[in-house]
Amino acid sequence: MKVTIIGNGNMAKGIATRLIGGGHEVIIHAKDETKGNELAEQLKQVSGDAAVSVAPVGSSASDIVIVATPYGEIANVAQAYNGFEGKVVVDITNPVDFNTFQLIPEPGKSGAEEIANQLPGAKIVKAFNTTFAGTLVSGTVEGQELDVFVASNDQDAKDKVIELVKTSGMRPIDVGPLSESRHLEGFGLIQMKIQDQIGTNWMSALKFIG
Ligand SMILES: NC(=O)c1ccc[n+]([C@@H]2O[C@H](COP(=O)([O-])OP(=O)(O)OC[C@H]3O[C@@H](n4cnc5c(N)ncnc54)[C@H](OP(=O)(O)O)[C@@H]3O)[C@@H](O)[C@H]2O)c1
């Protein structure tokens, strides 16, 4: 598949590493072209065959667009990026207020549903918010493949993301409609809060076993 990733930070690197491992084509949309090129170079070192290109944030012919920016930047991304209409848009954000370490959406709501309101016409799929960037780069934790929880109201869009996750060497788990994102975001928050306590230095994974 051809996938656009908006952003060139930790999660862009992690997700792109898995996608190129699955033979997918990745287009990095970077605010700063130099940073985008640096990431593309790193990805080509992972795989010499990697189909990676860099483009300014604008629009894309990809079917799937992964927004790998902070939650608070979505409004700016929506302004700068033309053409979310009809696209499968993957929301990976953890909408956390880092001053209070609490979720930004009010109880019972999710950031994903708020993003769906901000991007009318886009087919929003929540995924990857519980997979830490470093674990995506390594691909496994203690030899186990990563679980990626996926939520959406659009079944076709969700099936596409599930296929993308599976073919990129991870286990997709369909958790239901987009409203379930409120629980995924809660998981994401807890997973962040306990990092010092469990001492795994952001290399733990949330996984169902048995
Ligand atoms: N890190 C994790 O382990 C993890 C795990 C799960 C979910 N998440 C979520 O993933 C998202 C990204 O996290 P991250 O750790 O990758 O953050 P990061 O390393 O800080 O990267 C953020 C990226 O967003 C770009 N960006 C910021 N505003 C933008 C805009 N208006 N238009 C285009 N690009 C913009 C930044 O570009 P510049 O560098 O040029 O500013 C940077 O490349 C967050 O929403 C986070 O909650 C993170």
Image (cartoon, rainbow, N blue to C red):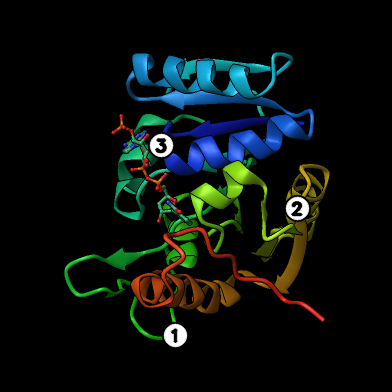
Nearest the viewer among 147 and 5 is 147
Q: Residue at 50% x, 49% y: name it.
A: 133
Location of residue 30 by image quarter: top left
Compared with 40, 84 (above or below) is below
Residue 10 drawn at (x, y percent): 44, 41
What is the secondary structure assignment of the residue under circle 2? loop
Q: Which mark is residue 108?
A: 1
* Label 3 crowd (10 A; few <14 / some 14-19 / many >=20): some
Quick check: 11 left or right of 18? left
- Residue linked to disc 3: 9
The amino acid sitting under disc 2 is Met
Quick check: 147 left or right of 198? right
Separation of marks 3 and 2 at Cα, in angstroms:
21 Å
Residue 178 drawn at (x, y percent): 60, 69
Separation of marks 1 and 2 at Cα, in angstroms:
29 Å
- Judged from this view, the residue extending furthest toward the left is 99
Nearest the viewer among 109 and 24 is 24
Q: Looking at the image, do the residues carrying marks 1 and 2 touch, with CB atoms under 8 Å apart? A: no
Q: Which mark is residue 170?
A: 2
Separation of marks 1 and 3 at Cα, in angstroms:
29 Å
Q: Is mark 3 within 8 Å of ligand 1?
A: yes
